[in-house]
Every structure is written in C-alpha cells, then in structure tokens.
Amino acid sequence: MKRGLITNIILFLLFAAFFTPAVLIQRRGLENVLKNPPFQETWLLSSRSGPMLRLMSLRYDMVAADFLWLRAIQSFGGRGMTNRDWKPVYNMFDTITELDPYFEQAYTFGNLVIGDEGGQQTEGLKLLRKGMFNLIRQYRIPFEGMYVAQWSLRNLDMARWFGRMTVKRPDMPDWVPRVVAYLEVQAGEFFIGYRQFLSNLLQAIDAEDVALQGIALNKVRETIDKLNMFHLMQAYDEYTTATGAPPGRIEDLAGMPALQNVEMPRMSQVMALIQKYARAQGKQGVYEGWKDGIAMPTPDQIAAVELVTTATEGQTRMLPLEGVIFQQSLDKRTGIPEEPHGTRYVLNLSKIGYPWVQKDELILSAAKLQEDLAGLLKGVRDAIAERKKELGRNPRDLHEVFYTDFNTTEPFGGKFNYDPTTGNFTSSTFPKL
Amino acid sequence: MIVIETKRLTKVYTHDFIDVEHGRLRFNFMRKTVALDSLDLEVREGEIFGLLGPNGAGKSTTIKILMGILFPSSGSASIMGKPLGDKSVKASIGFLPENANFYDYLKGEEFLDYYGTLYGLGKAARRKRIDELFELVSLPPHAPNLPLKGYSKGMLQRIGVAQALLNDPQVVVLDEPQSGLDPLGRKEIRDIILKLKENGKTVFFSSHILSDAELICDRVAILNRGKLSTMGDLDTLLSSTIKDWEVIVSGMSAESVAELRPHAIKFLERERDVLFVFDKEEPVRDTLRRVVEQNATLVSLSPRRETLEEYFIREVSKKPAQEAKTDSKSRSAANV
Amino acid sequence: MFKVLAISLNTFKEAVRNKVLYFLLIFAILIIVFSSFISDLSIAAPDRLIKDLGLASIDFFGFLIAVFVGVYLVYNELDKKTIYTIVSKPIDRYQFILGKYFGLLITILVNMVIMSIFLFAVLYWRETFASDKLSNLLYPEVSSGKREAIANLQLHYYWFHVQTFFIAIGKAVATLFGYSEAVTAGLLRVIAFSALGLSIITAFAIFYSTFSTPTLSAVFTSLTFVIGSLSEDIVRYAEKLAEKAGGLAALAGADVLKYNFATWAVQIVPNLAYFDKRAEAIHGPAAMEVPAILGPTLSDPWAVAYGLLYTAGILCLASLIFNRRNFK
C-alpha cells in the first residue's frame, strides 16, 4: 500500500517534470506566432499543381477545391493583395478551377482578386476565359470579362467579343443584351444596337412597362442618331476633300455619295410602324408621355404603312413582329437624314473652320444647337451684366466687355446683335431666345 | 444398412509457400503432409460409432471431409448412400465441430433460431424445436436469453449439441464432444448420445477419451497417423475372457498369504488387508477356500477384462517400423 | 432465399457490434455537421460546401466501412471456425457468400442513410435561417408590435430554434422517401449512385477476403478503389503515351508494356466515375449538360445496369473461389 503510494507520487513528479517544460516550450511557440506574418503561402502554389492534385484527391476533387477555395478567401481576406505577388494567387485559383472546372465563383472571385485588386487584368481575363469555356451555359463569366475589357482595359474589341459570348448564354438576364448592344453601337455596329433596342422597345410595350419603354425609346433614338451622324460625317469628309472648303449649309452635303441611297432607319417611320401594328392588335402603342422630343410620323405616314398580314395574324404581342418592323424600317434614302428628335440636322457654323474642334461637334440637331446658342447667349449676357455693374451703365459695345473683338459666328448662320441703349444681346435667327 | 462409408479416403495438405511456424517465417517448397491415408470406414445405421486415435491421427480431418469442410485429395465417401456435399443429406445430418465457437453476440435462442433457418425450418417448427432442445440438453432456464458470450464451456458444448440436433437428424456427427468438459459434463453428453441411439439415430463421434467411448460405443475404429489401425465391434475387439482377478482379503493368516504369494502376478500388503492379482483361476479358488476356512473377510473380488485403453495403447505402439515410415513420408511427401 | 437473408441479418448483427463502425459513423457525422460552420467562412456558395463535403463523406466513409468492417466478416467466420457449422448445414457456399455480401451492404446502407439524414437536416436547418422571411418567421408577434411578445423575446428565440431543429429532422427523413426542396434536389440520386458504386467495392471486399488475410484484403480493396477512381485518368495517360511516341506503332520498349497495362487494367477494374454524380447535383444539370471534362459519360440506366452486372460478376467469382476452398 505504502509502496504503491510512493510509486504514484514519483510518477506524478515525473509527469510534472516532463510536462511542464513541454507546455512552456509550446507557449513560447504560440507567442512567436503573433510575431510572424499571418500567411505563408509557399505550399503547392509554385506552379500549376491542379492536374496532379486532382489525381491525388481521387474522385473527391471538389472537396479539395472547396478547401483551397476557403483558404484562398481567408488568405485574401487576411491582407488583400497588398504587398503580394499575384502569381501564387493566380496559381491558387488555377488549381481550384482545375480541381473543379465548374466552380463559377472561383473564376469570378479570382478575377476580382487578381484583376481588380492585383491590377493584373490580363491574368484575370485568362482565368475568366478558362471558366467561360468550362461553363458554357452561364452568362456570368463572359459578362465579367466584358466588364473588365471595357471598363478596366478600355479594349472595345475585346469587350465586344466577350459581349457576343455573353448573349449566347441561355441564363442571361434581359438587360445584358442592351449592354452588349451599347458596346456594339460604340464600335460602329449600329444595326446590331438598333435591332436590339427595337426589340427591347417592343418587349416593353408588351409588358406595359412605361419606364422600360422610355429607356428603350431613348436608346433607339440615340442609335439612329449615331448612325445618321456617321453618314453625315462621311459626307462632310467627302465634301471637304472635293471642294477644299467646309460646307456653308447642311444641304450642301446632300449630294455627297455617302448620302446616296443608304439604309437609314427614320425615327418617324419606326414610330409609324409601331403605332400601326399596335393599333392592329388593339393596343395603345408607345406611351403618350414619351412622345416629346421624338420625330413623330404624320398621319399620312402611318396610313402608308403596309401591314404584313402574315405577321399580324393572330398576334397579341409585339415582340414576334420585331423582325418585320426592323425590315420595314430599313428604307433606303438619299439626302440629309431625318433627325430623330423631331428637329433637323444643322451645321454648327460657329465651330467650323477651327482646327481644334472635334469633327463630331460640327453637325448636330437643331434642338441641340439651339441649346448651345442659348448657352452662348446667356454667357455673353452675364458678362455684359457684370461689366454694366462695374461701369454703372450699359457697355458701349462688346469690345468694352471682352477687351477684344467679339467675332464669334452665329451657329445658325445669322447674326448677333448688341443694342447699347437697352443692353440686349440677341441672335438674329432666334430673336426671342 | 451402411450410413457412412469411405473408400480409400486420402487427404494431403499442401503447405502455403510462406508459412509462420512456431513464430518463425518458413518457406516451403512443395511441402506436403499426409493427414489421412486410404481410409476405409463403415458406419451402420442405428449404432454409436467411435472414431478413436491419438492427437493428429486424422480424426478431425475425416469428419471435416465428411462434413464438406475439406475436400479429399483422393478416394471417396458417401453418407446415406449419396456422395458428399448433397444438400438433402446435409439436411438430415447434425454436426458439432471440435472446440466449437459460436457467435458470442447472439443470445442462445437467437443462435438456434439462426441455425434453424439455415436448416430451412419454418418459424413455428423452429420455435417448438428450440424449446425441446433446451430441455434435452438441460441448459439452465436463463440460457435462452443469455448471450453466448456469457455461457460457460459446458453450456457452450451443450448448445453446440443442441444446434446439431435442430433438424432432428438421422445421423449425428460429433467431433470430440467431451473435450474440455468436467466429469459431470462428460456424463451428460454420454447420456445424450445414448438417448439418441434409443431414438434410432446413428451417432458418429471422435474422441480421445477412451473410457467414455468404451462405455457407449457399439463399434469403434482406431486411427493412427492417418491410417486405419482397427475397426470392429467393441466386444470383439476386447477379448471376452477375463484377463486377471483382483482379490482383496483381510484377516488371513500370514502363512496362507505367504503360500499364495508366488501365484500372484501382483501382490500388495496393506495395513488392514492384502491385495492379490492372479492371472489364473486356480489360486483364486484357493484364496476363497482359505477365506472360508480361516473365517477371514473377503473385501473384494473382481475379475478384470482388458480395457479399451490398454487395447488402444497396444494397437498404437504395435507397429513402430510402419510409423517411422509414415513419419518420413510426412516430412517430404512430394511423391505421394 | 430465407437462408441468405438469415446470414445477411446475422452478418449485420455482427458488423453493428464492430466499434470501428461507430468511430467511422461519428466521424462522418461530425464532418457533415461541422461543414455547416466551415461553410460560413466561404463568401459565396456556402451550400455547395456543405453538400460537397457531406456527399463526399457519405461516399468515402461508406468505402471505409466496406474496407474496415467488410474484410473481417468472412475472416472471422474462418478464424472462429463458425464456418464449420455453417458449411455442414444444407446450404450452398454461394449462399453464404451472398449472405455475407448483403449483410455488409445492409450495414453500409444503414450508415449511409444515417449520414444522409444528418446532411439533409443540416441543409434544411440552414435553409430556414438563410430565408429572407426569417424575421417574419422568427418574430411574427414582435414585428406586429405586441408588448408581451417582445418581453418573451429570448424564450421565443430558443423555442424557434427547437422548432426549426425538429422540422429539419422531419424533412430530412421525408427526403429519404422522395420529398425534396430546392436545397436538397437531386441529392438522393447522388447518394443512391454512391451506394451502387459502393456495392461494387463491397463485392470486392468480400471477394478478396475469400482467399486472403484481412490486411491484404483491405490493401487490395483500397487499391481497387483507387484505380477504379482513376480509370479515366489512366485511359488518358495511355493515350498521352501513344501521342508522345507519335502513334501506337511508334511505341517502343517499356512504353508498350505500360500502354498495354494501362489500357487493359481499366477494362477489368470498375470505373467508379460512373457512380459519381456529385458534381452534377452541386453544379446543377445545366452546367453538366455538355460533354464534361470530368463528368460521367454513361446514362443512368446504363450505369445502374453496369453496377449490378459488375457486382453480380464479382460475387460469382468470389463464390467460385469459396466453393473450392478447404477450411483448415
């Protein structure tokens, strides 16, 4: 009994003697942990280890992907991309997506980390490209690629390529084609944009979604405007090459080859088509409130629209008519195109002849030019008012206001008039402006 | 009618190429051991047949071959006139292996029920039979609900016998049914075997406890080193004549004792009495006469026959030359 | 038939008493339950992680049970010599093998069912808390502004958890019988196919243990599992070998051996990829509709037929070997 007790005591003392230093050593190690940087990512990130890891994980590759994914998140959450080489991070995401090629979030998050955070947009796109071909039915990845290409890399062609990939994906939401169409219009593919926006407009009419109608209508108008401007600019170039001098009036351009017999949809015609088809289906058509600032058709024009009977028969929705309306709106026309806001195209004469002026500022809609003119008038009038305060009277002439000759040309080709007695400054084209 | 018959039954074990023997790794190349050498047996209906022999004589091998656990190397055997492995025959055989182990997690009743199913008995038949058997092998009343883990060695042996009798078999084969049991247990097994014989069953069992075998066997076969040494009726084998007489007397005069002593093959003078062993009848008569004359006391008089054990030892040690031959065969028997 | 069933049930009783089984089961359940907490670390697709880890656990621990429990089943009978009494009964040896096989299969299936219930319950439980209407569910009276309800907020909160727990368990059990919500859609199919794959591995475990020791059987079974999992990669490897050499005819030396071994080995070893439907269930059928890089290439009925035929074949082989076996 006594002997047993002594043995136990000795054993306990030995336990204490061994265990205490062990715990102390461990504690010291734990203290050191805090002094070290939190993450040491050297393991398996030195190269593309995905295929090997996939073999090693047997058929549990997705679990392996999950754990690497968690690690990637923790690692990124720990200190972002600060002070870090992007290559191991890229390898990590590459490995994850090698283990599980259908891991959508790994592609998008990887792109976010490497491209947006790490500044390696092209490497991020590489990841997205890989994902795009593995996940061929999801729009998300090519869409992000489009986003990165357009807004980070400013590479319109690449963005359009990603865009075209995006719109082929079946799960794409309906707003995606509008974004893609926008890019196409940017790149000069007006008809792709036009048709897309037209179909959106018809969809909105079907859905009786007023807000969407407004957006789509605006987009259609904008696209037609851009297309018209494109032709006008061509004509402008042809004119200046041929005559060696800028045109004096917009009508001068009408005879140029660029404006001969070209397909240019007219806003009024589009509206006429929509109204006519909508009426045929017993619908209101475009919302009344949106008709301001749009070239509206004349009643004759509406009457002249031929309903393609096979297309209208039995239809209660506008969207199936998209192709018909698109085709019917593409009439070949010669001369100055119709301005889709309901005004007309004019030359901005006050800018012509100045080499620093951008070419696309030279031609614009009358309404827009009128706004510009109003702005100009207001500026001058404010300056006159200021000067009047200083002088205590109306300035004698504009020279007294600007200390130089005021020789700006009136944009519409008229004249600026200054009346020293009343202090009024007006344009001869729009005296009441 | 012959129930079990073997003809030139031979079993040769081929050792594994790599074997662990006595805790040592051993490589064997074509190493073979003859366990059973041309055995011819006949067991008749309704008898108790004892298969006897020293350890390693081939008793278990014979039984295993008969039960389909081993396949013979050559020769053939039949049970109830049908070749080995016949399912209809198996259905009317009961078998208790040597040192039987059973599923120790099953309760006694579950265990018998399981084996009853293997015999293809219906649920009601099983129920009835199991109750009968618990009674027959006289297991304690708590046994049916006790897991086999809690069984004593004797109880296990008894439930082993019970499982062999589940199907009410015509032939019961018991391999060393009494090994490891105390005398009381051995007696119970003996009683069960006799009871089976009473019911007209054939019992075939192996044993190395010869005194027990002697008590119940009708016929025996003695195996030695894989060969049949003897087979026959127990009565025929053991000579029916009296081998010697053992006489114990007390109160006999020292003179008479001295006179009788030269005739005795064995003599022992004890405190109260005197023991003679005579191998002839003459001195026995003489002794009895002197007892009557001297008014001495006859403590006991027993004529002694040869026991199976003595016969067995005689048989087994009879052929040393042949044994040596068998031995060398077992060492390297590539030519067998 | 009843005899096979009796042997199966006895085998099941035996397997259930194996402590290893409980360690495996508890470990698997811990993984499934803790995957719920781990998934909170993920910024996206938390359900994916639970499902993935859970389904993989069910599959892998089923395999471990087949190995660590299965290889002992036949061996124990031989070792304890209970086989003596079994063989002397009027049954065929193949019936014994079938009984052992189905007993082990029942054990594995029961374990898979238990693990599945936990997986489903975790998913349903999380689903409740992920729902947008949680605040309405949780505090209907509170949002309606009843004063006593606010006083009992704590109690209400606990009560809600208890309720959710039991509802999740109930739904999980119902899922086994075909009930499903978005969060568990398709999982039952995955588990069923997992079981089919495991039925092959189980057959192998029994097959190997008819002629070798438990340790060797475990090694063989594991190797079969590994090679079976890599079948498709091995095929690709062989293809690559030929490609590297520039055509089959140009193969030389050891490469010929390697090529033949690789192409022939995969013919015999089961292709477990056919029974791996995890990726499909987790990514949704839409993602996997195209010819997959990793995915299975066998349609469901064919995969089922394949699994059953393969299992039957291996069991026949096992019976064949067992039939000729001497029990020392």
Image (cartoon, coloured by chain):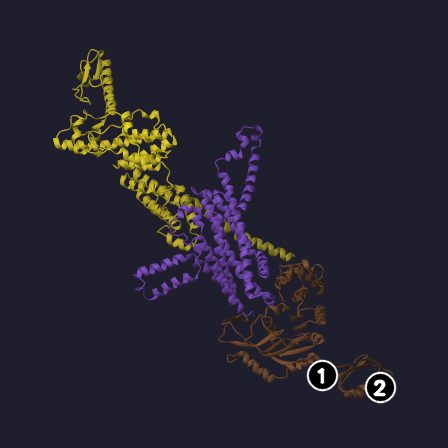
Q: Residues within 10 Å of mark 1 (few under 14, many from 20)?
A: few
Q: What residue do we see at 51% from left, 76% from top?
A: B31
Q: Residues within 10 Å of mark 2 (few under 14, many from 20)?
A: few
Foreground label between 2 and 1 = 1
Image position, residue C265 (x, y; %) = 41, 62
Badge 2 or badge 1: first in the primary sequence = 1
- Residue A118 appears anywhere in the view: no
Image position, residue A164 (x, y; %) = 31, 41
- The vertical placement of A148 against B71, above or below, is above
Displayed quadrant of residue B107:
bottom right
Along the line of sight, the residue nearer the viewer: A377 or A310: A310
- The vertical placement of B305 against C9, above or below, is below
- Give the chain letter at badge 2: B
**Tint of chain A:** yellow
Q: Which chain is brown?
A: B
Image position, residue B244 (x, y; %) = 75, 84
- The vertical placement of A180 against A361, above or below, is below
Q: What residue do we see at 66% from left, 82% from top?
A: B314
- Discs 2 and 1 share one subunit: yes
**Amino acid type indicated by mark 2:** Arg
Image position, residue A184 (x, y; %) = 28, 37
- Give the chain letter at badge 1: B
Residue receiving disc 1:
B239
Label 1 residue SS: loop
**Amino acid type indicated by mark 1:** Ser
Relative to B71, is A260 on the left or the right?
A: left
Q: Which chain is purple?
A: C
Residue receiving disc 2:
B289
